[in-house]
Amino acid sequence: MRSYDEERQHQEDLQRIRGFRLIDDDFMNVCFEDNLEGTGLLLRIILNKPDINVRRVKTQKAMKNLQGRDIWLDIDADDADGKEYNIEIQRADRGAGRKRARYHSSILDAHLLKSGDIFDNLPETYVIFITENDVIGGNLPLYIIERYITNMQEPFNDGEHIIYVNGAMRNDSTAIGKLMHDFFCTDPDDMNYKSLADKVRYFKEDEKGVAAMCKVMEDMRNEAAETAVEQERIEIAVSMIKDGILSLDQIAKYSKLAIERIQEIANQLSYC
């Protein structure tokens, strides 16, 4: 039996779920996790390659960079031919910058060769941004970016591909337009592609699917609360370190942060 506040939160969650679309990050992550059929459909339409056979899909995959900034891939997939795909869903224009696409491509490459592998074994990669607005500004449904030898007017053919999908062009007369229509659709009955509609319907209408989606939303709230507490503790620790009165061990005790985290913060402050 839920309490009054729990029932109110549950009803708010159900209302939010009804309004979710595939262009919304959290809902997309759930709908595409391990979804070979849906991801395959997505890639075959965007790349216009009907023979793509997706063999693995993960959402929100972390890629570490020991020398700099890590990235989280919205969708990470590969196909039967060994090609690698990173699909990013971006509603905010600032999240789909050209240098971000370049960075994603570089980090993807850095994780694809093992020590001792030859560079020719580097697989073909695709970084695909699906954006809510026309961030490139050319009024086209797709923007295909390739490297060229400019003074020869020939493609460089290094296997790197970057593609932007303009979600603002939701024209039902083309395959890509129908796909973008589905990405912005809240009602699975109004969607064009069955494999996508079935997933959306499951998480919006099926009892188990709705329960799973509610659990995701609860986990997100808990994570946000934990992050807020962590940030507050860090701010307290920073103030104590700057005061210079207490030892790092004492600061760890009072801030409830691990001594290793306190040492890391102290090291960062020493370089400021």
Image (cartoon, rainbow, N blue to C red):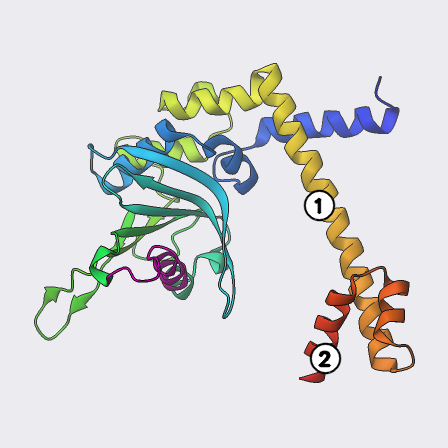
Relative horizontal placement of residue 35, taking residue 263 as reference (left or right): left
Q: Residue at x 34, y 54 (%)?
A: 112
Secondary structure type for disc 2: helix
Quadrant position of residue 256:
bottom right
- Decide which of 4, 57 is in the foreground and name it: 57
Q: Which residues are magenta?
A: 102-118
Question: Residue 130, image x and y in percent?
Answer: 39, 46
Using the image, tell me which numbered label, if any, was put on residue 223.
Answer: 1
Give the residue number, with chain letter if any, for mark 2.
269
- Decide which of 220, 116 is in the foreground and name it: 116
Question: Residue 40, image x and y in percent?
Answer: 32, 33
Q: Is residue 175 visible?
A: yes
Question: Residue 175, image x and y in percent?
Answer: 27, 33
Q: Is residue 108 above or below residue 216?
A: below
Secondary structure type for disc 1: helix
Q: Residue at x 51, y 60 (%)?
A: 70
Q: Residue at x 82, y 69 (%)?
A: 237
Type of amino acid under label 2? Leu
Q: Is residue 243 above or below residue 222?
A: below
Relative horizontal placement of residue 226, taking residue 72 as reference (left or right): right
Relative horizontal placement of residue 146, taking residue 212 as reference (left or right): left
Type of amino acid under label 1? Glu
Pick the quarter of the image with the C terminus. bottom right
Quadrant position of residue 182:
top left
Q: Residues within 10 Å of mark 1 (few under 14, many from 20)?
A: few
